[in-house]
Image (cartoon, grey):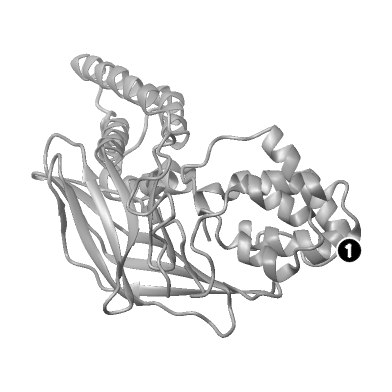
Amino acid sequence: MNHLSQHPLRGQPADQSHGRVVGRFAVAFVTVTLTVGVCLGSCACAALQDKELSRQEFGPGPVPPRYQGNLEALSSALAEKLDTTAWNMVRRLRARLGHDQARGLQDLSGARAFVEGCARVLEGRSRVSACSFRLEFRRNSEARELELLLLIQNRWPRDLVFVSGAVQLTVDRSFIEATGEMVSVTRRVALPTQPEWRAKSGEGTEVSLGPWPISMAGESLAGRIAVSLKLIAPKVRDGEDRFAVGGIGVESAPYVELAGFLPTQALQPKDLVPAVLDSDIGIHGLIERVVRLDPAAYGAAEAEILVLIERATDLEITARIAPVLRWITRGVCPGSDPREWRLWAVEQKNRTSHPGAPSVLDLPGS
């Protein structure tokens, strides 16, 4: 394997303007790590967290009809991640419950339990949100293997302890040949986890998730690996307080291995389009170029290539554009029908022209 000493990311942070991507290149590999949010940013995880806490913390008890509308509004604010609004509702409801108790009303236990349960959801969110999680591959050149690390940075004013019932990894591997043929394999691995991961306040914590062998399939020009991690039924402990967390999910950016004979200097997106348009460059040359793209530039490269589909012939789409886009988009694209590619390109253009809510995870890899 040759070295990527000329690559601009070697040993240096990548563009962190979005607060998510850092990276480096090592021997004939691309390593890009990704600072990500946690699964709590999604409604699904919020719902899971709320469900678990409603069972464990809210407790039984009737809710007076006069409180039902307010509690439904509080529940909606939690589900929509409007935490500031939810905290204001909790404060008002606590004051109202205190006032009603002073008046001698006796049917308040259900409403109070619900409000305090919601407050615990918010308390847990605030602690988890104060931590950043990152998955990073580190290369051991002597052992020819990668070590997968979970890095936790705790910005909470006190130490936090994360306790997880299990750790599940989803491993995606992709290999591409000089012909443009790409093979992807996904597998799930359940790993034993330490009983507790202590994240010291103001410091970083490293958790090793084990070694991963470096491999290249057959005649491939490049191989790519990306991992997503899920902590199942985790809890976060702050001193004597323990808060259930519906799920913490972290996704890595890709680690790309290049065949040893390939050039090691990274390709810029602006250099890819001329190569696609140059009929003197065969598919082998195109694939050699696209696998040397910095994964952080996949989005920009995709936008550049999509523009070509509108005026390309059917043969140009299937023979030149499609193989390039399959690698860049991690295979999330049509098959071999040029008509499907044209429709897909229009859909992608419309999606980027009218973006929805930003994703919690800004993942540029496979």
Q: Out of 74 and 32, give the one closest to the viewer.
A: 32
Q: Find residue 365 and report its horizontal and vertical position in percent.
A: 52, 57
Residue at x-position 27% and y-position 79%: 143
Residue linked to disc 1 = 315
Tell me the quarter of the picture where residue 64 sits. top left
> Is residue 307 placed above or below 99 in the rendered structure?
below
Is 38 placed above or below 365 here? above
The crowding category of the residue bearing disc 1, from other C-alpha atoms within 10 Å (few below 14, some 14 to 19, many at least 20), is few
Q: Residue furthest bottom?
A: 218
Position of residue 337 in the picture relative to residue 227 (left or right): right
Q: Is residue 330 visible?
A: no
Please say whether residue 186 is visible from this viewpoint: yes
Answer left or right for 363 relative to 96.
right
**Where on the picture, by quarter, is residue 333?**
bottom right
Picture coordinates of residue 169, whole percent (x, y): 39, 68
Instruction: Tell me if 271 is positioned left or right of 136 in this view.
Output: right
Residue shown at 55%/60% (left/top)?
292
How far across and how far down the image is residue 117, in percent? 28, 38
> What residue is at 67 percent from the left and 52 percent from the top?
272
